[in-house]
Amino acid sequence: MQDGNLYENAAPPADGERFETLLAHKGLHIERIVSSAKIEAHEYVQEQDEWVVLLQGEATLNVAGTSIELKSGDYLFLPSQTPHTVMRVSQGALWLAVHLR
C-alpha cells in the first residue's frame, strides 16, 4: 500500500519546477509537479502519452503551436510526440501528470 497527500510539502522551489514521482507501476508513471513563477521555457517531446491536470494556479502552454490557457481544475491530454512548452505559470502552481507507456 502507498498513500500520501498531494497538497502536503507543496511549497514551490525558488525557481524552476520540482518533479516528484508518486507512483511508477508497469506502464504507468504518476508525478506531482510544483512550479515557481520563475521558469525557463523548455520544449518537451515525449515518447509516452501524458494526461495532466492543473490542481491549483494558472498556466499558459504552447502545444504544437497553439497557445492554451489553463486554470485550476483544467486538464489536457498530450499524445506521444506532441511538442509542448510551459510558457508561463503562477507561483506555486500544482500539477498532477499521468504518463502512459
Image (cartoon, rainbow, N blue to C red):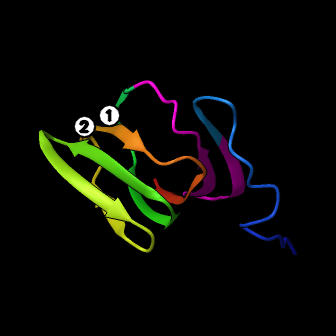
Is residue 34 visible from the viewing direction of this image?
A: yes
**Residue at the disc numbered 2:** 83
| Depth order, front residue of 49/68 | 68
Height in image: 28 above or below 15?
below
Is disc 2 surrounded by few (<14), some (14 to 19) or many (20+) residues within 10 Å? some
Q: Residue at x 70, y 50 (%)?
A: 21
Query: What element does badge 2 sit on?
Result: loop
Amino acid carrying label 1: it is Val
Q: Is residue 76 magenta?
A: no
The N terminus is located in which quarter?
bottom right
**Residue 75: x, y in percent?**
37, 68
Amino acid carrying label 2: it is Pro
Q: Are marks 2 and 1 in contact (CB under 8 Å)?
A: yes
**Residue at the disc numbered 1:** 45
Q: Quadrant of residue 85?
A: top left
Q: Earlier in the sequence, mark 2 or mark 1?
A: 1
| Depth order, front residue of 8/22 | 8
| Depth order, front residue of 2/91 | 91
Label 2 – label 1 distance at C-alpha:
5 Å
